[in-house]
Image (spheres, rainbow, N blue to C red):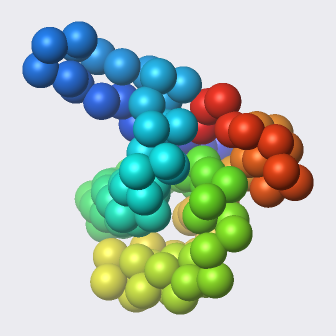
Amino acid sequence: MVGFESLVRWRHPELGGLAPDQFIALAEDSGLILPLGEWVLRTACRQVTQWYSEGKNPGRVAVNISACQLGDYSLLDVVRTVLRETGCRPEWLELELTESSIAASHGERSEGW
């Protein structure tokens, strides 16, 4: 194993489990994508740090970055803060830019995360 990917799902009280392609656009449109993305990043970094502290070697954790996060000037500061707060080493983290994120950053609509 070389690592793992952090995948977010929404457990909606009426609709059940929703995949990212069912709610990321809503999170982007409502302005909730930045705090959601930060929560996912922090949770993934906290988990990988815990595994390393337990003597496990999980490799890197990959976290997807949305187009909105990519365009947000505070992304670098958020990553630095999360790494510092969680004790996660930079080499344990991989930030993934999905094709839809790149397309959306060039004016096209993101359809997933």
- Which residue corresponds to the image point at 36% horizontal and 63% vertical from the top-left? 35
**Residue 13 position (above or below residue 54):** above
Quarter-wise, where is residue 53 in the image?
Answer: bottom left
Q: Position of residue 107 (x, y in %)?
A: 83, 51
Percent coordinates x, y for residue 29 in the rendering: 49, 48
Q: Quadrant of the N terminus?
A: top right
**Residue placed most toward the observer, 30 or 79:** 30
Residue 86 rendering spot, x and y as whole percentages: 33, 76
Q: Residue at x 59, y 64 (%)?
A: 69
Nearer the observer, 98 or 68: 68
Task: Write the residue at 56% across / 84% down.
Answer: 74
Visible residue check, residue 48 = no
Where does the image place residue 71, in percent across and percent down from the top left? 69, 69
Look at the picture and state if 15 lies above or below 40: above
Q: How many marks?
A: 0
- Is the residue 23 above or below the residue 35 in the image? above
Picture quarter with the C terminus: top right
- Residue pictured at 61% horizontal, 60% vertical: 68
* Residue 66 in sight from this viewpoint: yes
Between residues 46 and 101, which one lies in front from this camera angle? 101
Q: Is residue 93 above or below residue 65?
A: below
Q: From this viewpoint, which residue is outermost toward the top?
A: 15
Does 93 sit left or right of 88 as displayed?
Answer: right
